[in-house]
Amino acid sequence: MQIKELITPNTVIEMVCFLTGLICLLNSKIRIWKLFPIYLFVNCITEMYAIHLRKHHYDNQWPYNISIIFEATFISIMFLQFFNKYFKGKLFIIGGLALLLIAYGYDVKAHDFLLFKNITNDTLNETANDLMSVLFSIYSLSYFYLLLKDEQYINLKYSSDFWWVVGVLFFYFGSTTLNLFRSEFKSESELPNYITLILIWMIYGSWSYSFICKKWLTTKSLS
């Protein structure tokens, strides 16, 4: 495996986000933030290994099919932490995960685990990914609604929670919209791929900044 073949716009921003998270979240007092770099590391390995498989003409869908489990779990737990500041959100999140599990099982049964594809691989819509995009968009909008009703002053410029959710909303709402209009693009058009790349950079860029905010807040609280 040659390292240079693994360097793509996707892997570059993913690695930057992972390293930023590793540096900024190491001393976080909140466990899910501290563990979040593990999820980012899984993303990096998945993307690089899938690229390696594709370069050597092997089916590369199955690594994504495994990583989607980490994706649904970690992001849902993050939202649970945010929602718990305003209401007991466990049933809300568990219900969403149950729906995703059902959709995931349907996709695996309908398409076979090795052939089941998702939006990460720039293919047609799949039930689990579509549902996950809609759910995470709803979670994001719900968080912003709760934030607007919150009477406590929050400096959004330095709010790690806010910028983390901004990244999620950009990516998953954008992916949902792209899926709805994907059939409108010509078959040879590269525009959907460019849009997906922009969405990926937006979510990892926002997450990187949220990690920096979390580090700044932690350092300030300890000083």
Image: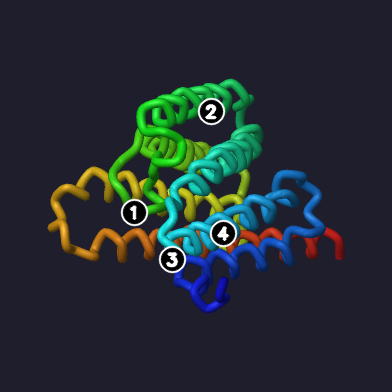
Specify whether residue 142 is in view: yes
Q: Amino acid at mark 4?
A: Trp
Looking at the rendered structure, the secondary structure element under dot 1 is: loop
Judging by the rendered image, the residue that carries numbered circle 1 is 122
* Image position of 218 with respect to 75: above or below: below
* Image position of 154 with respect to 104: above or below: below
Residue 142 percent across, percent down from the top left: 47, 36
- Verify CB contact (< 8 Å) between mark 1 and mark 3: no
Judging by the rendered image, the residue that carries numbered circle 3 is 55
4 or 1: tag closer to the N-terminus? 1
Q: Residues within 10 Å of mark 2 (few under 14, many from 20)?
A: some
Looking at the rendered structure, the secondary structure element under dot 4 is: helix
**Alpha-carbon span between mark 4 and mark 1:** 22 Å
Looking at the image, is mark 4 or mark 1 nearer the viewer?
A: 1
Judging by the rendered image, the residue that carries numbered circle 2 is 97
**Alpha-carbon span between mark 4 and mark 3:** 29 Å
Work out whether residue 65 or residue 196 is closer to the camera in this orientation and state it: 65
3 or 2: tag closer to the N-terminus? 3
Looking at the image, is mark 1 or mark 2 nearer the viewer?
A: 1
Q: Residues within 10 Å of mark 3 (few under 14, many from 20)?
A: few
